[in-house]
Amino acid sequence: MAEFKRAGIGCPYCGNDLYVDFDICPHCGKEVPTSLLQLIHSMHGTAQKPQSEPSQGHPVIESSEKKSLTHFEDLEEDSKTKIGTFERLYDDYMHRGGRRGFDDTDYAPLVSLLSSVLELELSFAIYDKFYLYWQELQKSHEINLPKNREDCTLGTIKFLLEKAERDKGYNLPKQAQDDWHYAENTFLGPLRRNLKTFVDERNNAAHKYSISKDKFVSFYNLYMEFYNNNMESILALKKRGDSLGYRLFVELRKDFPVF
């Protein structure tokens, strides 16, 4: 029995390995987006099936109209990978739409990619940077912190910021005050205003709801405006006062007892 060659790229729907000669994911059964197939064939030097023309009567967004996300160098490597994947899938997805039933398209994978970028960067800039503050709130407000940064979600960030707003900074450790004032003066206001929408759409995309084209466009317009206007400040906070010792503390703190 012939062994199928792995593509080295995960399915945007279920995350499992794709195969070079398959245009359908063998795990979840969904069609692999055309732009992702192009990438796979380019990587492996294999023949590619001719692309079908876009359906007549459906709007096509030209590349000149594409709204782009700034490529900040200080993004985490995983964030860069997710944004790159999003950009390769975007044009293929935006050629679709207006159909129903089995021919319709779920835009949830695009929402998930963008949401996970924000989730990852905020886990460094908000969760890690103010971990000592969250520990103080945990003692006084009976909340449970995720043990590892990897378990920090957008919902976690929203929950902690709501607790901090009620706390009025009473429990803010002295060594975190400058960073907190920087965050308040740069991006925390816009983040608080938009975070509920980001959390809701991320949860919808990750669970049982499909995301329509119109809903995705609305989400992306809001996301892109927030990202391009505020991500530079989020990344600057992530780097403020960073040191090898602090990074070591971040990695080892999961072994600390909570009193």
Image: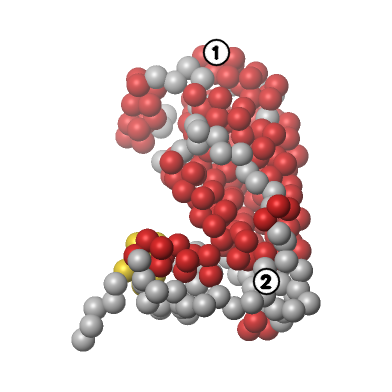
How many numbered marks does the figure carry? 2
Pick out the residue farthest to the left: 1
Q: Decide which of tag 2 and tag 1 comes sooner along the chain.
A: 2
Viewer-nearest residue: 69 or 243:
69
At horizontal 48% and vertical 17% (from top left) the residue drawn is 241
At horizontal 43% and vertical 41% (from top left) the residue drawn is 77
Amino acid type for the residue under numbered disc 1: Lys
Residue position for label 2: 96
Viewer-nearest residue: 74 or 201:
74
Q: Is residue 79 visible?
A: yes
Position of residue 72 measured from the top left corner of the image (x, y, whole percent): 55, 35
- Quick one: SS at disc 2? loop
Residue position for label 1: 174
- Quick one: SS at disc 1? helix
Q: Could you say which disc has been placed on residue 68 in the image?
A: none
Q: Quadrant of the C terminus?
A: top left
The quadrant holding residue 194 is: top right
At horizontal 75% and vertical 39% (from top left) the residue drawn is 193
Taking the image as shown, residue 256 lies to the left or right of residue 227, namely left
Colour scheme in use: secondary structure
Position of residue 239 measured from the top left corner of the image (x, y, whole percent): 49, 24
Taking the image as shown, residue 203 lies to the left or right of residue 120, namely right
Q: Is residue 15 visible?
A: no
Few, some or many C-alpha atoms within 10 Å of disc 2 (few <14, some 14-19, many ≥20)? some
The quadrant holding residue 206 is: bottom right
Taking the image as shown, residue 234 lies to the left or right of residue 97, namely left
Viewer-nearest residue: 217 or 35:
35
Taking the image as shown, residue 198 lies to the left or right of residue 98, namely left
**Position of 121 relative to 181 (above/below):** below
Viewer-nearest residue: 11 or 179:
11
